[in-house]
Amino acid sequence: MKKSHHRLEAWKTALSLVKAIYSTTSSFPKSELYGLTSQMRRAAVSIPSNIAEGAARETTPEFLRFLYIARGSLAELETQILIANDLGYMDELTPILDDLHRVSALLDGLIRSLKSRGSRTKEERPEYDEDRLIADAQTQDP
């Protein structure tokens, strides 16, 4: 049985971003192995990891907390990408930044969807429907 986070587009796209970061950083200078290379990889891995951990939690506020952490890691990664580019370690910046912005938009949509569900009064809230939550989050305007 697949876990709920396996169906989240934000998680899937974040996994693709991790692969792109690993590929890109493999050409960084060896002197950066324990510096920028390691930092970028850890920040990238943190994004889908936090999405998955949040999705496994029992409450919406817990899920939101982990999505905010993922969003923070995404901002950290963006900064590191810009630093790597300024240092001349990256040849092509646009595809990775496009992936990063896509993950950001998907995370923002998921957060908006969860927050709107959480702001309803108890009487207005429908029964928890995982499929609907995932569909709502993926159709939100970024």
Image (cartoon, helix red, strand yellow):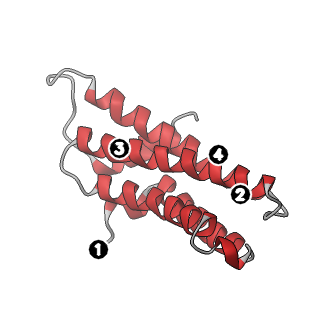
Residue at the location (58% across, 35% down)? 142
Q: Which numbered disc flags the more N-terminal residue, 4 or 1?
A: 1
Q: Nearer the viewer, mark 3 or mark 2?
A: 2
Residue labelled with disc 3: 133
Q: Which numbered disc flags the more N-terminal residue, 3 or 2?
A: 2
Q: Nearer the viewer, mark 1 or mark 2?
A: 2
Q: Amino acid at mark 3?
A: Leu
For the residues labelled 4 and 2, the Cα–Cα distance comes to 9 Å
Residue at the location (43% across, 41% down)? 110
Residue labelled with disc 2: 96
Q: For the residue carrying disc 3, how many other residues have a C-alpha within 10 Å: few (<14), some (14-19), or many (20+)?
A: some
For the residues labelled 1 and 2, the Cα–Cα distance comes to 31 Å
Residue labelled with disc 4: 101
Q: Amino acid at mark 2?
A: Ile
Q: For the residue carrying disc 4, how many other residues have a C-alpha within 10 Å: few (<14), some (14-19), or many (20+)?
A: some
Q: Are marks 4 and 1 in contact (CB under 8 Å)?
A: no
Q: Which numbered disc flags the more N-terminal residue, 4 or 2?
A: 2
Q: Is residue 55 above or below residue 127?
A: below
Side (left or right) of 2 relative to 84: left
Q: Amino acid at mark 4?
A: His
Q: Nearer the viewer, mark 4 or mark 3?
A: 4
Q: Are marks 1 and 3 in contact (CB under 8 Å)?
A: no
For the residues labelled 4 and 3, the Cα–Cα distance comes to 22 Å
Q: Position of residue 132 (x, y in %)?
A: 35, 45
Residue labelled with disc 1: 1
For the residues labelled 4 and 1, the Cα–Cα distance comes to 30 Å
The quadrant in which the N terminus is found is bottom left
Name the one closer to the observer, 124 or 105.
105
